[in-house]
């Protein structure tokens, strides 16, 4: 049982205590001790060092701490010494995918794309702001009134997104996306129910055969996790280039390199664009490109261009279906190539991308699922032809997939590794 409660909002504290349940005198001692510790520049102190500092501050302020008061304050300090401080218990809960802090006393979590308010709270607005700055420092980034929005990573576990209070009502805002897999393979996805083994075998086959795969879905549906797992199916003798704006994709592959895009600094210089990284990649003797996410016209044009030139790859895109993913690609390309007809844009898409996978949260079970796998191309009468290979159609609470098409357009390329015709018409977990 967790020490925090998600069933109801936190109760208002008694008038004689602050939001951490501390009497004003103890809260004052705690804040002064934090200030003393912050001047030492050390990330972590032993319990003995914390106790000595606490006693020293209390004595300086003219207080004599009872043993239970000392232990209470020490528990606050020890918790804050951990990487995520008071949020550590949320980070440690494997069912939590996102932590959202929109105010010092409003901390929300997401589980299965559903939001729950917790009973946790920072001591004050100032305490919360200092916490955000410390966390960003650990992620190697910062924010300011000149650059009010920033992203960063803490190890491979947590992606941070922070919005400065200058543009956020009652802010700052802090969002932590948690990655629960240091290493992930297709067998792990089967075990967690993302899709049956047969679907992942098909995707592994098209990846191995050198096809470009686009993963579509909404926020928090597991797009990046699926990319990481499928990247493990790329032949080990190939050279990979991973391009992202925030370093989330880390692969266990002998020949992988990483480039990171960035926005311009406060002086308006230093931008490293997706197209700049892709052009550099073309000179790096890469075999495949893995592009973190297609968010705009520049990224779409760059990814389509490199894949159409003979470098297969993978990327993700926000979309509510496979068909919408294609429409968004065409929209992005149209913005980057004004005046070009839709037929030409469609030709560019099908030349570069062969398979689209859509992932979503199942409304019946709350679990992440592969909901659709489509092969796309060619263009006929100005329209992209689609071939649905797998379609998620749950029967009650039973995860079920149908196979509308039993012949792949890439049969010759994948038949030595996978056969659609050998599968039953319905797949279940």
Image (cartoon, rainbow, N blue to C red):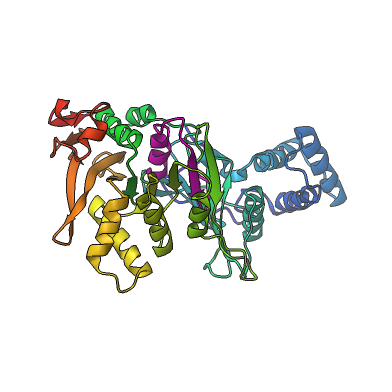
- Residue span colored magenta: 222-248
Q: Nearer the viewer, residue 159 or 424?
A: 424
Residue 420, above or below 353: above
Residue 294 horizontal/vertical position (percent): 40, 55
Image quarter in which the C terminus is found: top left
Lateral position of residue 425 relative to residue 164, left or right:
left
Q: Could you say which quadrant of the image residue 112 lies in?
A: top left
Residue 155 horizontal/vertical position (percent): 59, 41
Q: Could you say which quadrant of the image residue 364 lies in?
A: top left
Whether residue 231 is in magenta: the answer is yes
Q: Residue furthest bottom?
A: 339
Observer able to see residue 320: no
Observer able to see residue 212: yes
- Which residue occupies 22% across, 64% down? 343
- Which residue occupies 77% across, 43% down? 42
Lateral position of residue 273 relative to residue 296, left or right:
right
Residue 424 horizontal/vertical position (percent): 14, 27
Lateral position of residue 359 relative to residue 419, left or right:
right
- Which residue occupies 25% across, 26% down? 416
Q: Nearer the viewer, residue 290 or 86?
A: 290
Whether residue 260 is in magenta: the answer is no
């Amino acid at each position: 049982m967790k020490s925090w409660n998600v069933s109801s909002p936190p109760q208002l504290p008694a008038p004689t205590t602050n939001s951490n349940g501390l009497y004003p005198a103890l809260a004052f001692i705690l804040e002064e001790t934090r200030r003393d510790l912050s001047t030492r520049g050390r990330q972590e102190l032993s319990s003995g060092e914390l106790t000595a500092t606490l006693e020293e501050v209390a004595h300086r302020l003219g207080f004599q701490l009872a043993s239970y008061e000392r232990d209470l304050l020490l528990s606050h300090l020890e918790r804050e010494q951990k990487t995520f401080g008071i949020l550590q218990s949320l980070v440690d809960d494997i069912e939590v995918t996102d932590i959202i802090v929109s105010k010092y006393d409003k901390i929300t979590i997401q589980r299965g794309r559903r939001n729950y308010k917790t009973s946790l709270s920072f001591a004050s607005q100032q305490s919360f702001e200092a916490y955000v700055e410390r966390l960003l420092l650990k992620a190697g980034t910062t924010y300011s009134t000149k650059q009010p929005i920033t992203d960063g990573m803490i190890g491979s576990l947590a992606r941070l997104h922070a919005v400065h209070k200058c543009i956020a009502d009652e802010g700052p805002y802090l969002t932590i996306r948690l990655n629960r897999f240091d290493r992930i393979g297709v067998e792990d996805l089967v075990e967690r129910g993302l899709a049956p083994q047969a679907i992942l075998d098909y995707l592994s086959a098209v990846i191995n055969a050198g096809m470009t795969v686009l993963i579509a879905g909404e926020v928090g549906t597991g797009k990046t996790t699926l990319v990481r797992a499928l990247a493990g199916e790329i032949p080990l003798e190939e050279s990979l280039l991973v391009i992202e704006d925030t370093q989330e994709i880390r692969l266990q592959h002998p020949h992988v390199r990483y480039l990171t895009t960035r926005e311009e600094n406060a002086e308006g210089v230093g931008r490293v664009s997706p197209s700049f990284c892709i052009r550099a990649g073309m000179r790096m003797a890469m075999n495949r490109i893995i592009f973190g996410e297609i968010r705009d016209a520049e990224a779409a044009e760059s990814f389509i261009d490199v894949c159409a030139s003979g470098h297969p790859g993978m990327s993700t895109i926000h979309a509510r279906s496979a068909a919408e993913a294609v429409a968004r690609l065409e929209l992005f390309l149209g913005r980057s190539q004004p005046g070009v007809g839709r037929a030409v844009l469609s030709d560019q898409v099908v030349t570069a991308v062969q398979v689209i996978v859509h992932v979503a949260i199942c409304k019946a079970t709350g679990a992440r699922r592969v909901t659709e796998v489509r092969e796309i191309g060619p263009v006929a009468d100005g329209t992209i032809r689609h071939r649905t290979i797998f379609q998620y159609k749950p029967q009650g609470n039973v995860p079920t997939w149908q196979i509308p098409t039993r012949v792949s357009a890439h049969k010759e390329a994948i038949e030595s590794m996978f056969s659609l015709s050998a599968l039953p018409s319905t797949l279940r977990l």
